Structure formats: structure tokens, C-alpha cells
Image (tube, rainbow, N blue to C red):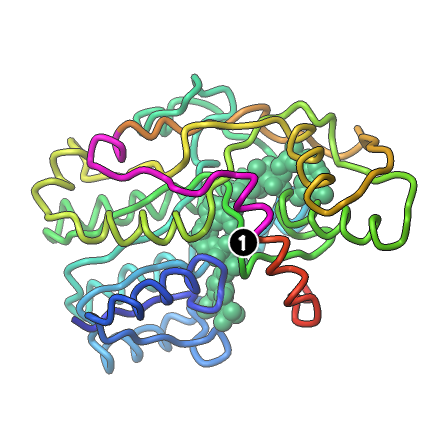
Amino acid sequence: MKTYVAGHRGMVGGAILRQLQARGTDEVITRTSAELDLTDQAAVRDFMQTERPDAVILAAAKVGGIMANNTYPGQFIYENLMIECNVIHQAHAAGVQRLLQLGSSCIYPREAAQPMAEDALLTGVLEPTNEPYAVAKIAGIKLCESYNRQYGRDYRSVMPTNLYGPGDNFHPENSHVLPALIRRFHEAAQSGAEEVVIWGTGTPRREFLHVDDMAAASLFVMDLDDETYARETQPMLSHINVGTGTDISIGELAQMVAEVTGYTGKLSFDTSKPDGTMRKLMDVSRLTRLGWQAKFELRLGLEQTYQWFLQNGENLRSK
Ligand SMILES: NC(=O)C1=CN([C@@H]2O[C@H](COP(=O)(O)OP(=O)(O)OC[C@H]3O[C@@H](n4cnc5c(N)ncnc54)[C@H](OP(=O)(O)O)[C@@H]3O)[C@@H](O)[C@H]2O)C=CC1
Ligand SMILES: C[C@H]1O[C@H](OP(=O)(O)OP(=O)(O)OC[C@H]2O[C@@H](n3cnc4c(=O)[nH]c(N)nc43)[C@H](O)[C@@H]2O)[C@@H](O)[C@@H](O)C1=O
């Protein structure tokens, strides 16, 4: 089995690569974005035609937190649409029968009933801070569904909740909340700062899944036999949510990060920054029914991620 992992240097792609290598059953092929720009249609066509993988895992994307999504909406919609169109279409053109792509919980309407089940898709208005990214991710689901319907492909989609773990992006502005707070609280603890500022009101709730759980869930869904996947994702051979099924407020998360990093000063909230969606808890009953459950407990995952941050402080991403 020759499997192409797109985005193998990223947090999720890296974890998937490690788990595939540990299994040792697949020949895994990878390319960095410098070697293969997935927004370049001709380059992706040449790569797929030359390599002809048996399976593709699409974990490459333009990714960022609430501020990055709000600041660079053009890049978020363009790059993600191009990556999905090129990888999914050129995989099909090269005869790839099985593909798994990663979406995001932000595909669901801002006011969706909680927890959000897969059939909440396209039932309401999206959260404005990440609408361009969400539209691209919805297009990814619809590409897979459409190629399944028209060409009989077996292209699957998993929708992760907010992820964290080793290999995350700790950029002060562009990252997601959990790595941003690890870095901010760590620096405050080191410098003896009296106050740490948290964006927004602290009241939004988020569900955090460790990246090793996400990688395991991705391979679990990839490995399901086609009848089982089709039965669970009827009528459109659509997507499966991945999460823990529990969430906490940003204020509670900040308190936990303060404890883990040893920060003892004051917490304050900058309400000029956006809260984004107030709650986006995944309904994970589809995946649970199939037999998969998350393993990492948040506090332990946070402590492990903080250790990774301390050991890799010199090599953090610059954007
Ligand atoms: N992180 C999170 O909280 C969440 C992530 N997701 C989804 O999970 C997937 C993986 O995210 P994550 O691992 O966090 O993201 P990362 O930013 O860590 O990794 C993304 C990877 O995509 C690759 N990439 C980006 N643009 C291109 C391009 N034009 N051509 C080739 N490769 C490119 C990069 O490759 P290189 O390093 O070689 O430049 C990078 O390694 C994405 O689909 C994301 O939308 C969904 C929900 C939450
Ligand atoms: C995974 C998901 O990620 C993005 O959505 P998001 O869940 O809103 O992501 P976030 O992690 O950036 O913020 C979560 C909450 O946390 C608050 N918050 C506090 N302090 C910081 C802070 O310092 N940094 C950040 N980023 N947020 C902070 C912040 O104000 C918000 O209320 C999508 O754009 C989209 O990419 C997507 O799919």
C-alpha cells in the first residue's frame, strides 16, 4: 500500500506520519510545500501521475486561529480551495480509490444546536471570523461526496474539533488559543509579569482534542471497510465528526495553562478581541458507535504539550 500524506510537516500530518511509520505496513510518500506547492494544479497533476499512490491523506491546509482567519481571509479561502480541488481531483485522475481529507468543526452554523451532529451542515449562517475557511472546508466535503456519487470513489472526510499537541504553531498572533496561551503564560512566568491578557471575554467554550488522538481517529476512519463507512455516512457518503465530547470555557483553559506553566499573577480579558463562536461542541456519537474514543485527558495533554514547547523553543514556527 503506497500512501501519500499531504502536510506531513504540520501538527496533524506529522502525527499521522509517525503512526503510519510505527505500523510499518504502508510505503509512505511525502513532499514539503517547497517541493510541491499543492495550490499549483500542474505540479499536483504531475506528482499524482508519476507517483500513483494507492491512498491519499490530505492534512495540508492554510491553518490558523481566530485572528489569522480574520486577518487573511483571502489566503484562507483561496489556498484551501485550491489545495482541495487539486489534491482531490488529481488523485481521482490518477486512479486513487481511497482518500481521507480533514475539515474542521467550523463548517457548522454559528448557532447550531449543541452538541453539533453531522447533519447540522448547511442548516444556518456561519461564524463570520472564519467563514472563508469554513466555506473552503465545506467545499472539500462536497468534492468528496460528489466524486463518490459520480465516479464511485471512496473519498472520506473527518471533521476535527480544536486540536493541540506536539508540533503545534505557537505564534503569538496567528496560532490557536491553546498554544498561544502556553507561550504567553510561560513568558509571563519567566519574566515575572504581573498580568496576562486573554483575548475576548473568556466565556466561549471549546473542545480540545490531542493530535495523537486525531491521528489515530484519522487512521481508524481510513481503515473502515467501505460498507461500514457508507452505512454510517448515508445518504451522501459524507463526513464524520472527531472530538472528545466535552468542552471547557476559555477562562477555565487559561486557569489550567497558568497552573501548568507555574504562572501566579493576574488574568485579564481584552474584550476588544473577538470571541468567535460561543460554543462548538461536537456530537461524536457516529464515531463512538463505530468503536473509536479519544484517550488523552486535557490536563495531561496540556502538560505534555508544555514539555514539548520547552524542548523545542528554539525551533518554533515564525508565521
Ligand atoms: N490545528 C487545529 O486546531 C485544527 C486543524 N484542522 C485541520 O487539520 C489539518 C491539519 O492542520 P494542522 O496540522 O494543524 O496544520 P499545520 O499548519 O500544522 O500544517 C499544515 C501543513 O500544510 C502544508 N501546506 C500548507 N499549504 C501548502 C501548500 N500550498 N502546498 C503544500 N503543503 C502545504 C504545510 O506544509 P510545509 O510544512 O511543508 O510548508 C504544513 O505542514 C488541516 O486540514 C486543518 O484545517 C481542523 C480543525 C482544527
Ligand atoms: C480550530 C478553529 O480555530 C479557529 O476558531 P476558534 O475556535 O475561534 O479558534 P482560536 O483557537 O483562535 O480561539 C478560540 C477562542 O479563544 C480566545 N482566545 C483567548 N486568547 C487567545 C489567544 O491568545 N489566541 C487565540 N488564537 N485565541 C484566544 C479567542 O478569542 C476565541 O474565543 C477558526 O478560525 C478555525 O481555524 C477553526 O476551525
Residue 16 at x, y = what percent? 36, 61
Q: Is residue 21 above or below residue 135?
A: below
Q: Looking at the image, which residue is at 21% across and 52% down?
A: 155
Residue in front for this viewpoint, 66 or 42: 66
Residue in front for this viewpoint, 201 or 299: 299
Q: Quadrant of residue 243?
A: top left
Residue extending farthest to the left is: 227
Under tag 1, what secondary structure?
loop
Residue 189 at x, y = what percent? 83, 49
Q: Main secondary structure of the magenta part?
A: helix
Q: Quadrant of residue 149?
A: top left
Quadrant containing the N terminus in the rendered view: bottom left
Ligand 2 appears in which quadrant?
top right
Kindly tell me whether residue 203 is visible in this rendering: yes
Q: Looking at the image, which residue is at 36% across and 75% down?
A: 30
Instruction: Report the amino acid beneath label 1.
Output: Val
Q: Is residue 246 above or below residue 45?
A: above
Residue extending farthest to the top is: 113
Q: Looking at the image, which residue is at 63% across and 53% down?
A: 306
> Horizontally, is 265 left or right of 49 in the view?
right
Q: Is residue 292 magenta?
A: yes
Q: Is residue 249 above or below residue 139?
A: above
Query: Residue beneath label 1, please?
Result: 63
Quadrant containing the C terminus in the rendered view: bottom right
Q: Is residue 7 above or below residue 194?
A: below
Residue 101 at x, y = what percent? 33, 53
Asked if disc 1 is less than 8 Å from ligand 1, the answer is yes
Q: Which residues are magenta?
A: 286-304
Q: Looking at the image, which residue is at 29% across and 27% down?
A: 285
Q: Residues within 10 Å of mark 1 (few under 14, many from 20)?
A: some
